[in-house]
């Protein structure tokens, strides 16, 4: 009588991740697992443990303003070694929040920045600057997201209320967001990124030459030159 043959069953495949749905209540790790399983999904955010997914993006209310905002940050980045800007990058803030801001800029970790890039290429902790283009999302951007960004330590938060033609710029002071004042010429001057100047009225009307002209004025200041030197010194001191 022969030896009984042992039949080895193949391992069961891992269970498929359920799809993300607006309003789902999830921890961040499960949110990431489901998001990764939906490569066709362009944007989803976890805010205070609740999944938010945007409506279709309108051209004049979001798409065009967003690229104008990103271009402004790109010009600053190009002349400020030691910072980095990006758009629509997911940010791991804490166990209940993973936002995907329309634009953000951070000081590189090697230059003393507070955020870092993970091994799997996500931003972890709060970037120094976060910016949102708010049309249908105004109530979220100025309430739930504002509180999350404040608590997480985002240093400056810009919200462009497109339909109102208004750009709010908040700066973190003593753990609270306060409105950054305009100077006498109607220009915002960043406190965290010296030389990052913005005439909000020009951006709101998409007068891009005027936006870049004001930015260039900021980039030509001694404060910006000193900031660049400070970043380079910090990089040189990093082991």
Image (cartoon, rainbow, N blue to C red):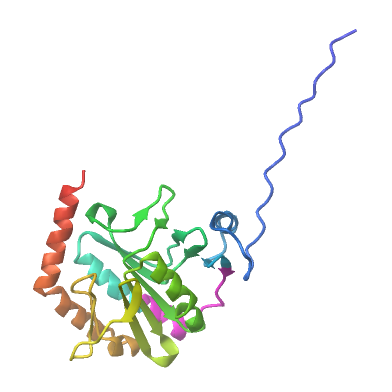
User: Residue 48: x, y in percent?
Assistant: 53, 67
The part of the chain drawn in magenta is 51-67
**Magenta stretch encompasses residue 206:** no
Residue 119 appears anywhere in the view: yes
Q: In which quarter of the image is residue 38?
A: bottom right
Residue 157 appears anywhere in the view: no
Q: In which quarter of the image is residue 220?
A: bottom left
Identified at 46% across, 85% down, the residue is 61
User: Residue 221: x, y in percent?
Assistant: 11, 75
**In the image, is 219 to the left or to the right of 112?**
left
How many numbered circles are shown? 0
Q: Quadrant of the N terminus?
A: top right
Residue closer to the observer: 179 or 118: 179
Question: Compared to 203, does 172 lie above or below?
Answer: above
Identified at 80% across, 24% down, the residue is 7
Toward the left, the furthest residue is 222
Toward the right, the furthest residue is 1
Identified at 20% across, 78% down, the residue is 215
Identified at 48% across, 63% down, the residue is 98
User: Residue 41: x, y in percent?
Assistant: 56, 64
Q: In which quarter of the image is the C terminus?
A: top left
Toward the top, the furthest residue is 1
User: Residue 72: x, y in percent?
Assistant: 28, 75
**Magenta stretch encompasses residue 62:** yes
């Amino acid at each position: 009588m022969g030896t009984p043959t042992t039949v080895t069953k193949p391992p069961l495949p891992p269970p498929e991740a359920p799809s993300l749905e607006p309003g789902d209540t999830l921890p961040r790790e499960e949110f990431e697992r489901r998001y990764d399983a939906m490569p066709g999904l362009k944007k989803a955010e976890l805010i205070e443990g609740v999944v938010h997914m945007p409506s279709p993006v309108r051209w004049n209310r979001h798409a065009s303003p967003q690229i104008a905002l990103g271009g402004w940050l790109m010009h600053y980045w190009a002349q400020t070694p030691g910072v980095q800007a990006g758009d629509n990058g997911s940010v791991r803030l804490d166990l209940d929040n993973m936002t995907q801001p329309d634009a953000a800029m951070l000081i590189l970790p090697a230059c003393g920045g507070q955020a870092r890039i993970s091994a799997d290429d996500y931003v972890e902790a709060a970037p120094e600057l976060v910016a949102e283009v708010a049309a249908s999302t105004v109530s979220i951007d100025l309430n739930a997201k504002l509180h999350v960004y404040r608590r997480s330590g985002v240093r400056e938060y810009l919200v462009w209320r497109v339909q109102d033609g208004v750009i709010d710029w908040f700066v973190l002071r003593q753990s609270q967001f306060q409105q950054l004042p305009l100077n006498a010429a109607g220009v915002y001057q960043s406190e965290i990124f010296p030389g990052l100047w913005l005439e909000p009225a020009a951006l709101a009307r998409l007068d891009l030459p005027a936006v870049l002209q004001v930015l260039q004025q900021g980039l030509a200041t001694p404060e910006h030159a000193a900031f660049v030197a400070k970043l380079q010194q910090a990089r040189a001191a990093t082991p």
